[in-house]
Amino acid sequence: MSNNCKDERLKPPAPKAAPLDLAAVREKLSQAKGKRYWRSLEELAETEEFKEMLHREFPRHASEWSDGVSRRNFMQLMGASLALAGLSACTKQPVENIVPYVRQPEEIIPGKPLYFATSMPLGAVTRPVLVKSDMGRPIKVDGNPDHPAGSSGSDVYTQASILGLYDPDRSQTIVELGEVRTWGDFLTSLQAPLNAQKASKGAGLRFLTGDFTSPTLASQMKAVLKTFPQAKWHVWEPVNHDNGRAGAQLAFGQTLRPQYKLENADVVLSLDADFLSPANNSGFLHYAAAFGKRRKVEAGNLNRLYVVESILSPTGAKADHRLPVKATQIESFARVIAGKLGVGGGATAESGNPKFVDAVVADLQKNRGKSLVMAGETQPPAVHALVHAINDALGNAGKTVTYFDPVTVLPDGFTSHIESLRDLARDIEAKKVELLVIIDSNPAYTAPADLKFAHLHMDDNSPAEWKQESILLKVPNCVHIGLYQDETAQFCRWHINAAHYLESWSDARTPDGTFGIIQPLIDPLYGGKTAHEVLGAFTETPGSSSYDWVRGY
Amino acid sequence: MAQIFHRSANSLARMSILGGLFILVTVGAVLAELQRSPYVTRQHEARVQNPPFSHQHHVGGMGLDCRYCHTSVEDSNFAGIPPTKTCMNCHAQIWSTQPMLEPVRESYRTGKSLVWIRVHDLPDFVYFDHSIHINKGVGCQSCHGQVDKMPLMYMEHSLQMEWCLSCHREPEKYLRPKTIVVDGKEQGDQIFSMKYESPSSMNPVNVKLADGTIRPFTDQIELGKILKKEYNLRKVEDITSCSTCHR
């Protein structure tokens, strides 16, 4: 068998098949009686090549694996090893040791886990969590039902965060241009550029962070910017709430964020708002639970969900009435609804489905104060503004939707994340930036390509080779703090390995504004540093620990 | 045609068949016995520890309660091996210059743990929980033997599955009351006692039951059946189910 295969391979490739005679094929089709199925024109024409291929079962070069060990031999060997593997049980158990504590910590019962409450920050969203810890090692993260903004469930990000702590790919040391350094080395080498910046009041000093809610970090940032009045702070988060912010600005004149009370809503209209999925959705757990409460037939107070969306989403799957529309049409749909409800009056474009619109409008009008309209984060600001106006007109504000001040801390004069990053890129291009500190942000990977945080560049001398370039290389002193030596770290002079949230002291605010403390479950596995400690290096007390900073605040 | 084999080959053939069977059975029996033998199970094999800790001295001589050292036995699956601090509670005062105790003092000085050899070592595929046994009326002694007579710790029983099952099939043979009454005085903590003897006609035991009544027993089976109800033991089918221990 295997010899045959080898011979097949040695054969010269078959001559190119003659082109199909379409006329003959047509003739065959016209003569065919009854149903006859075919998978290719070759099969229909019954060419010689096709018959040959069917005969050989496997096409050329896809023949049976024909190494020295045949399949049968392999099965025999593996079967024997499996059967004999049982014999390994017939041995003495190896000697095991017990290594007790020297001084046992309080509250630890060997064999029983302990639970600690902390908060898990992820961009602008903080989740109150309860972490199971066995003999000092965190092993499971779940929601904290005792926290005012918490619940017993959790989402994929929470569950996965424990794997991030033990990820062997985590950055394990401080690095300067590829060389291992200590924290002391970093503080020493920071002195010269820092003194230069002090002289120029920080004209060449820039900070780039991701979204964060920590009041301590915000106060530290404020203090640093006070010391260096010319320095600038930029925020870049690829998954952000800029559309919602701009919409609220349009509607209220301030950047309020809506929180929905789905338990009070009898009729819900979602305009591309995927509130039942955890992706980019701060209130997912709360919303899903509240929505679920109103879907119990036995309770008898069922709600009704209309979903207008451009993709398939979990929320759409739960909808009573789902209208799939093009992404571009959602805004005009919102305008039509608003117009019919007497808001704005911009009902110029008629939506493609007047029956659906009329039903939704009638249902919303019937349930004033008990209905809810939601706009998806990806929708343009106009849709958000319209939705705020509709909810207000229906008397829903305060009943099914409440508005909160945003918890994310942003720099003064901030308009949007992309503008903030563009400002930074412009300054870097103009060589104004001498010392750049990047905290928890990876612009080389997430920034739009035209900002050139990472781009391929062809060298004139060797046109065959593409080189990776970045405007970050124009910054003489670039410091990157992150859990991984990621794309941005490659372009920075300094990389500082960050502490995981399970290893650090900090604080954060949940989307409804509740404060939460982040407490460490374990000493930093690789001596990672927190954002507090790195920002602390720019203050009068560079040696303070994050515990000191959080306590001090 | 002449016969190839002599007539005696018949009996030779029969004998070799029987002999082959005999050898197979013998080898099987020897292996089975070997598997149960103390050579493999390490039953009754006193393990040399450093320092050579004596349960006989501490339990039998000094009268320490099991739980002074094995603190988590009532709460956790693991009975707990005491931290060096527990040893030093006393040995900072007494025998504080004994050369035998130098490893303990060194551990306390340097912060490096003592390393003990595990005597009772169940395979990792067995789930075992101390607390449930303690709380359901199984005495320490029932499994660990007369610890107060062991200068160096050894396994009293093989800890093999057939031994576990012998009790899980008939727990009433081994259960003991938590509180007994001797000469009108209540004596609790019988679970941890090394002096408790199960009732017989020669040794009647007065047991205080949950409803407060005191009853004399002269038969272990009779007492065990009552204790099974009193401590809410699960049915034999439940505690002999595979997944109870092999989770």
Image: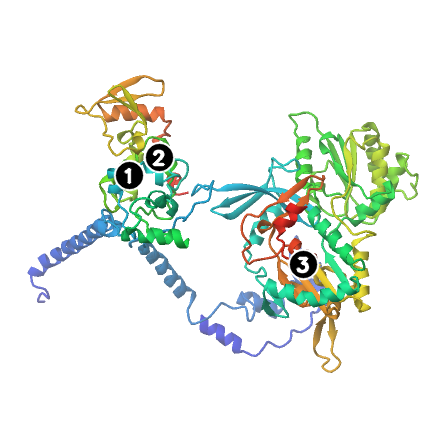
Residue type, numbered disc 2: His
| Residues marked 3 and 2, same chain | no
State the SS at label 2. helix
Please determine if labels 3 and 1 lie on a single subunit: no
Label 3: which secondary element: loop
The tag on residue B143 is: 1
Give neighbour class at mark 1: few <14, some 14-19, many 20+ (Cα, 10 Å). Answer: some
Residue visible at 44% across and 41% down? A109
Whole-percent x, y for residue A376 in the image: 77, 44
Q: Using the rendered image of the protein, determine whether residue A487 is visible from the camera's viewpoint.
A: no
Q: Which residue is drawn at 24% across and 42% down?
A: B56
Q: What x and y, as percent, mark residue A358?
A: 85, 34
Q: Which residue is label 3 attached to?
A: A537
Residue A447 placement, left or right of B91: right
Q: Which residue has dot 2 on it?
A: B133
Q: Which of the pair B16/A406 is nearer the observer?
A: A406
Chain designation of label 1: B
Residue B220 placement (x, y as % from top left): 24, 26
**Chain that bears disc 3:** A
Of the pair B182 and A93, the residue shown nearer to us? B182
Q: What residue type is labelled 1?
A: Cys
Left or right of A342, for residue B38: left
The numbered mark, 1 or 2, whose residue comes first in the sequence reads 2
- The amino acid type found where label 3 is placed reads Ala
